[in-house]
Image: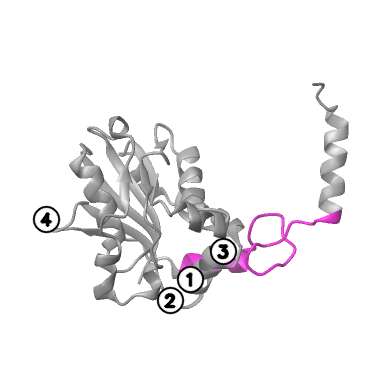
Amino acid sequence: MKTLPKALIFLCKEIENILFPPCCLLCGKLNCSIWCEECKKELYEKAILKIEKKDSSYYFEKHMYLFRYEGKIRNLILNYKFKDKSYLYQIFSEIIIKNEKICGILKKYDIIIPVPIHSKRKRQRGYNQSELIAKQIAKAQQNLHYENKVLQKIKYTVPQSSLKKEQRKQNVQNVYKLINQEKIKNKKIILLDDIYTTGSTANACAKLLKENGAKEIIVVTIAKD
């Protein structure tokens, strides 16, 4: 198959920019980047970047998150997950990738694994929100491998967000399955999810990883409730 001449490719891009001018993904204003300076400043001011060490009751050693799950951040995440705004992964990914402290931590790990969602929910939603972000992080980090065929959610459950905190631990019992043990043996793993509330989901996934040979696990989320 012949490739298009560079001049034609350039012309197509120019026409595309005229018909669909680039806009800020948050406020919709015309902008040459994925977000405008006003929106970028607002989100960076809300970022807190916390790293919590976990005790022996957890199967992961640390939890790192960027925001509190409140206000505009909460609305953004809800839109990202439930309102077909998958493109917002670009915003969340960029905040992580452009942070030197975060990157300095992540480069110490071998694998990044997104928390899986059930195949039925993925068909309904059209995407796994954690996968989109994890892929971008892996692309930006040398020697960090993206793996989405290690954990599988085998039971369709009600969303954690619809449950009280005391019900969430029960809701994730025996719903995940490890499908590729060799990829995690003696590896330092980043487990990525969008929201951390009680830690039940993260701990259920981390338990499988640790029991099957993972060396160390850090849970990374966009926000903590």
For label 4, the residue is 56
N-terminal of the pair, mark 4 or mark 1, is: 4
| Colour logic | one colour
Quickly name the residue at label 3: 40
As drawn, 178 above or below 219: above
Tell me whether circle 3 and circle 4 mark residues in contact (CB < 8 Å): no
Q: Which residue is mark 1?
A: 73
Query: Taking 149 as reference, is 170 left or right?
Result: left
Q: CA distance from mark 4 to mark 1?
A: 31 Å
Nearest-to-viewer mark from 3 and 4: 4
Instruction: Examine the structure image and report whether residue 189 is included in the region drawn in magenta.
Output: no
The residue under label 2 is 70
Q: Earlier in the sequence, mark 1 or mark 3?
A: 3
Span of residues in magenta: 19-45
- Within 10 Å of disc 4 (Cα), the crowding (few <14, some 14-19, many 20+) is few
- x%, y% of residue 26? 62, 66
- Furthest residue toward left: 56
Q: Are dots 1 and 3 in contact, CB under 8 Å?
A: no
Return the residue nearer the eye: 111 or 97: 111
33 drawn magenta? yes
Q: Image height check: is 68 above or below 3?
A: below
In the rendered structure, are the residues bearing label 3 and label 2 in contact, judged by CB atoms less than 8 Å apart?
no
